Image: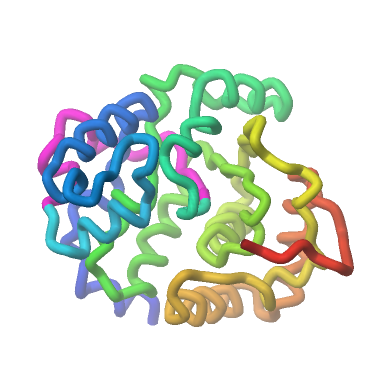
Amino acid sequence: KLVSRMTAHQEFKWSQWSISVSNLFVLLESLCQLPWFQDKRLTIESISSHDISRYLKSGGRHPADQFENLFTPEFPTAAISYEWRLNFLQLKKYLNSTQVKDAVKKWGASVSTNMDALFIWIDVFFIDQASEDITGNLVRARAIYEKAQHHLMILTEDFFSRAWCLWELSVRYQADGETLILESDSLDQSRLQSDFMFFDYMQAFKESDLVTIRETICQAFGVPASFDRDMKKLFLAAGGKYSSKVVEWT
């Protein structure tokens, strides 16, 4: 059933492309020079995935079509999971050689610490933002999170409340793949709290996304309790703490 619903946007050519971390930030500088972004006074200090998604939904040319030299058709080395509320300047506090080196040392991982050689898959560029076929997008994204050599979790206080982040994490976990947790100095570890009811309290910007993600999780795990149990393991591994009075998600 999932595969049969993919066809409407199967022609999206960049779904398995990648971009190096270094080129990602070069790309963002270039995007901020385009009239659409300048009209909205967006800069490298403020631009976020929400802005890029709005640009693409408005009919803007895909960045890989305009700046093809910054992208590669090679399958990504690493898929990343992150909150869209972060702007890219905030994201860079995680995606840099120092933070990756710290994580590699802490977790004993083998991820490249050379940002020119770390080729990532980031959803806002490699999922068709103009598509309303959420199920098809989940199918295509699943292939990345299952097969990428590495998975990078951008750990923020609200990460475990976000439906897309939890779904990506669960796909990787069920595929028995390694997840590398990236932290930054701005992380407030005291706010990383949960009562472990991840399925019930997950949130998404679009209600239709939330409904489809919950349906997909139930298909994969059978019952929400199984999903919550596995997410609890990952939450505790990330340094989260149990609390019956959960800090309100922002």
- State the residue in front, 10 or 70: 70
In the figure, residue 219 lies in which quadrant? bottom right
Q: Position of residue 238 (x, y in %)?
A: 74, 44
Q: Position of residue 249 (x, y in %)?
A: 66, 64
Quarter of the image with the N terminus in it: bottom left
Q: Is residue 118 magenta?
A: no
Q: Looking at the image, which residue is at 42% across and 50% down? A: 144
Q: Position of residue 170 (x, y in %)?
A: 61, 60
Q: Looking at the image, which residue is at 21% across and 64% down? A: 57
Q: Looking at the image, which residue is at 57% across and 25% down? A: 100
Q: Looking at the image, which residue is at 32% across and 33% down? A: 24
**215 vs 61: above or below:** below
**102 vs 48: above or below:** above
Q: Position of residue 124 (x, y in %)?
A: 34, 52
**In this orientation, does residue 126 appear?**
no
In the figure, residue 77 lies in which quadrant? top left
- State the residue in front, 81 or 145: 81
**Number of numbered tags placed on the structure image:** 0
Quarter of the image with the C terminus in it: bottom right
Q: How is the image coloured?
A: rainbow
In the figure, residue 87 lies in which quadrant? top left
Give the residues drawn in magenta, as a range: 61-82
198 displayed left or right of 17: right
- State the residue in front, 83 or 79: 83
157 displayed left or right of 14: right
**In this orientation, does residue 33 appear?**
yes
Q: Is residue 62 magenta?
A: yes
